Each structure stands twice: as C-alpha cells, then as structure tokens.
Image (tube, helix red, strand yellow):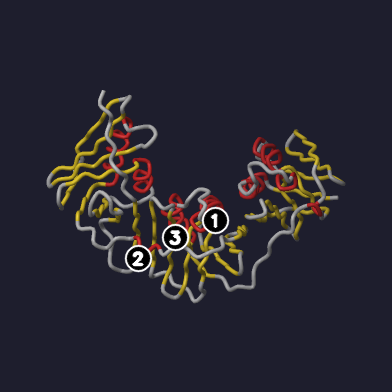
C-alpha cells in the first residue's frame, strides 16, 4: 500500500529527469517502468536501461510508505496534462490511483521487486566540477562522438581529471574535439570513457552549482542537486589522439564565426545531397566557398575573411564543418591548414596562453567533379 501527496511542478520535474533514461524500446517490459519509493519525507523516482540509471528525489507528504513500478511514459503523459495542483497517489497491490483537482486516473503497475537492482555510490572519492563547465565541455565535444562504430572506444568521450587539470575529448575518425582547462585541477584522478547517452543526460538535466563525479571499476556517476546519474563506462584504451593533431599547418584563415556559418548554410543548399561537399578556394585576399550538384547546379559566395598562405583548394563535408562551428562560442575563428589532404585545426582566435584551450579538428575530403553533360 502507498499513499502520498506531492506538488505538481516537483513531480513533473522529477519525471522529466527519470523519463529521459527510459529506453525507446525494450524486449524487457520492466525497463519501461519508473520505480516510485517513499524515503523519509521524499518520493524517490528511478528509471534505467541497465547501462544508464537516473535517480531523483522530490519532497512529499507521506501518509503510507511503500513502493511500486508504473509505466513510465504513461505516467509522464498523465502528469504532464494535470493542472498545477497537488497530486495524490494512493493504492494497494499493483494498482495506483492518481488524483489531481477533479480528475482521477487508475494505473496498473508492478511490484518493485521485479525492478532491476539499482546501482549505489561507489567508495571512490568524488571530483568536484562546476555544472556549467562540464555542460559546456559536453556541448563542445559530444557531437564528435562516433555512432555505433566497430571501435567501441570511439562510441564515448574521454573524460580526464587530475592534478594537471580537466580534459574532454571526442572523435569519430573524421573530426575531433578537445577541450582543456588547466585551471580546473583535482586531487582525484578520473580517466573514463563515458557514453554519449550519459553525457547528454547530464547536459539536459543539470542546472547550476557543482557536480560530484565518482569513478570506480566500470561505473561513473554524476551527483547534482537531488539527482544521480549512473552509467557504465566503455572498456578499452582511447586512441592516442594527440598524435593526429598537426602542429605545422602554416596556412591561416581568420573569419567571423557567425558569418562563416551563414555562408556555409547558403552554399550548402546546392551541395550534392549524398556527400554534402563544400569547396574552399583560397588565395591571398580572396576566399571563395562553393558547392555543386549534377542535378541541382552550383553555388558560390565570397567570404569576408583574412587568409595568409599559398593558394589551393580544399573540400569538407559541409554538415561536419557547420556542426563544429555551431558548437563553438567565440566571435572569430582561426582555421589552420597545410594542404588538401592534411587534417585542419579550428581554434578560437582570442585563445589565451593560460593553459585553457579548445580545438576542433576536421579531415578534408577529396574534391569530386560534377560529370559534364
């Protein structure tokens, strides 16, 4: 039996947290449920897909303690449509009545004993990171995480924290993103490959303050406010990414980031729909951005930018380049190139020498010709 009263906004915020961990589809029905448990003067809600678990607590007036699992998406859907009044839960066995205002909903659930065993805090000491710093690092790197690559280590981002500072790296083999913050050091050493789902969940759910990060064995956890995110880490050694970052790119393009994005967006409308290829024609005093498609035609626009280096042409996958630029936050960027085959490095033009840095790397693509009719 369970009986309690909760504030509607608290309940909805809690369900927004845990519902994000529910698998989109599963052959195990109990994984689509949310576990509700009374705990002192709180209601604890949990959801898991066995790899990633989210647990959060909200204040509650508990009349009768108990626990039950309810269909997560249906519960979330009901609460989302309720008026902003207190919500009552009451019931016995596996059936719960949810009352709010003049409405009442009866929902069938399951015993909490059928729910998977939840992870608990590891004995590891936590590293403390400002929430906004970790969220910003995730935004600037997670887009480069590979999707279902046969190299398992590329399907996550490398998170490193130690006495020398903080670093996060992601790559899919075509592009790479790396953020380093030397000023954010910790006595706790963490070197973990974190899944993209766990990173995205944290970035979506976190708000402000600090996050406590614990790592031990194959589990990493993020604790902030009244919420915990647990995730299995990826086994294996991350590739030696420093070796692929060129240090002798001597051709430099400096441009306004927003203007470059706007030109790319316009020119990309005429790019080959299967390759999304964009061509840069570079020469002193002139930067021409072009695209062409055998079916649609072609587009070209001159970019207002500063270029120093020998004249040459280089091609990029337009979507990849735009995604890099969109996830940067600076006003102007510096694009360092060598030739049409060497990896290109993109940095913030105003980057300082205080040990904090951000760079993105993108591999150029072989320029293709539109067949003549």
Which mark sits nearer the N-terminus, 1 or 2?
A: 1
In the picture, measured across the screen, residue 32 lies left or right of residue 182, that is right
Q: Where is residue 348 in the image (x, y as percent from the top left)?
A: 29, 56
**Which residue does the numbered mark 2 point to in the structure image?**
356
Q: Is residue 346 visible?
A: no
Q: Do the residues labelled 1 and 2 touch (CB within 8 Å)?
A: no
Q: At numbered mark 1, what does the secondary structure look like: helix, strand or loop? A: strand
Front position among marks 1 and 2:
1
Give the alpha-carbon distance from disc 3 to disc 1, as whole Å. Answer: 18 Å
| Residue 162 showing in the rendered view | yes
Q: Is residue 182 above or below residue 320?
A: below
Q: Where is residue 315 in the image (x, y as percent from the top left)?
A: 28, 43
Residue 133 shows which numbered tag? Answer: 3
Q: Where is residue 219 in the image (x, y as percent from the top left)?
A: 61, 64
Up-down relation of residue 302 to residue 246 (above or below): above
Q: Earlier in the sequence, mark 3 or mark 2?
A: 3
At 67% from the left and 52% from the top, the residue drawn is 48
Which residue lies at the image location 26% right of the left edge and 29% below the top edge?
298
First in sequence, mark 3 or 1: give its number.
3
| Residue at mark 1 | 195
Q: In 3D space, how far apart are the residues under numbered discs 3 and 2 (Cα atoms)? A: 12 Å
- Residue at far top of view: 373
């Amino acid at each position: 039996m369970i009986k309690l009263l909760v504030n509607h906004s608290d309940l909805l915020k809690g369900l927004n947290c845990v519902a994000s961990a529910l698998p989109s589809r599963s052959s195990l029905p109990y994984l689509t449920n949310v576990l509700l448990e009374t705990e002192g003067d709180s209601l604890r809600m949990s959801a898991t897909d066995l790899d990633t678990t989210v647990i959060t607590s909200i204040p509650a007036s508990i009349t009768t303690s108990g626990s039950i699992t309810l269909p997560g998406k249906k519960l979330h859907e009901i609460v989302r449509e309720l008026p902003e009044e207190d919500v009552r839960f009451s019931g016995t066995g596996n059936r719960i009545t949810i009352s709010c205002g003049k409405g009442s909903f009866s929902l069938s659930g399951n015993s909490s004993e059928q729910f998977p065993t939840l992870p608990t805090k590891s004995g590891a000491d936590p590293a403390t990171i400002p929430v906004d710093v970790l969220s910003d690092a995730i935004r600037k790197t997670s887009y480069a995480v590979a999707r279902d690559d046969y190299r398992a280590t590329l399907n996550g981002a490398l998170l490193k924290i130690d006495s020398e500072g903080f670093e996060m790296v992601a790559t899919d083999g075509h592009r790479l993103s790396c953020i380093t913050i030397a000023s954010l050091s910790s006595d706790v050493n963490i070197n973990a490959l974190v899944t993209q789902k766990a990173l995205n969940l944290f970035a979506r759910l976190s708000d402000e303050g600090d996050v406590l990060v614990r790592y031990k064995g194959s589990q990493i956890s993020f604790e902030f406010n009244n919420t915990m995110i647990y995730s299995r880490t990826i086994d294996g050694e991350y590739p030696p990414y420093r070796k692929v970052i060129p240090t002798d790119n001597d051709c430099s393009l400096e441009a306004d980031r927003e203007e470059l994005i706007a030109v790319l967006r316009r020119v990309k409308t005429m790019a080959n729909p299967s390759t999304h290829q964009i061509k840069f024609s570079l020469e002193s005093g002139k930067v021409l951005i072009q695209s062409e498609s055998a079916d649609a035609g072609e587009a070209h626009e001159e970019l207002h930018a500063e270029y120093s280096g020998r004249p040459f042409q280089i091609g990029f996958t337009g979507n990849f380049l735009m995604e890099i630029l969109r996830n940067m936050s600076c006003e102007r960027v510096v694009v360092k190139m060598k030739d049409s085959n060497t990896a290109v490095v993109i940095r913030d033009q105003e980057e300082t020498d205080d040990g904090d840095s951000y760079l993105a790397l993108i591999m150029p693509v072989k320029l293709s010709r539109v067949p003549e009719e």
